Amino acid sequence: GIAKGDRVAIAMRNYPEWVAIEPVWGGRTDIRKAECALAMLEKAARAHPADALAQTWASHANYYVAECYTSLGEHDAKALPLYRKGVAYAQAARKLQPQSVPANFWYSMNLGRSIQFTSLVNKARHLNDIVVPLLYCDREDSTYSNFGPPLMLGGIIANGGWVAEQGMKMAGITMEMAMNAIDIAEILYPQYLAIPF
């Protein structure tokens, strides 16, 4: 099945291959199924290069599998190449459909994770690249992907250090604003344990 945060899946039903992809993606808590879904979604993105949604799904799937590897301590060897591919797919989607919340969100998520363990200077260099599309997502649909935009903004503020704090201040985002959204998210998605964390 499709989780609430995966609302964009409905539109993929325009493609015959989605019939095979959907159940595999639904079982993605098994890393082997997640990797299989990733391969299927990348194949769909290659088959439909002019479709922003197909590119976005490939970006999302790369992020998901990469995040699993990061959590297993395999960030540099296995996750980083996937985050970078996720950035490339999202960039393609954003060129095709600049106002797409999913494309902008997965671009920010993949880029953020790809620089997560780099120098402060590198993080500062990419701050606007991450925050501008993320703020767009927050304004347009802050509930996307289980309140993903405010969760990421809150994470940036809480964990990004002085550079992130200054960048958020320039963007007009305060920790109180992020916390209000996170409080609402926790009420609406109590089963999503990343929110209270």
Image: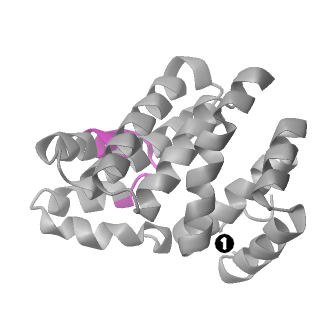
- Residue 49 vs 140, above or below: the answer is above
Instruction: Locate the N terminus by quadrant.
Output: bottom left
Instruction: Locate the C terminus by quadrant.
Output: bottom right
- Kindly indicate the quadrant of the structure image that contains residue 25: bottom left
- Answer left or right for 85 relative to 196: left
- Residue 133 vs 150, above or below: the answer is above
Q: Which residue is mark 1?
A: 191
Given residues 142 and 20, the one toward you in this image is: 142
- Residue 165: percent from left, percent from top: 87, 46
Judged from this view, the residue extending furthest toward the left is 16
- Residue 75: percent from left, percent from top: 60, 25
**Residue located at (80% from left, 65% from top):** 196
- Residue 27: percent from left, percent from top: 38, 56
- Residue 15 vs 33, above or below: the answer is below
- Answer left or right for 89 relative to 166: left
**Residue located at (38% from left, 35% from top):** 88
- Answer left or right for 115 relative to 56: right
Label 1 sits on what residue type?
Gln
- Asked whether 155 falls inside the magenta stretch, the response is no
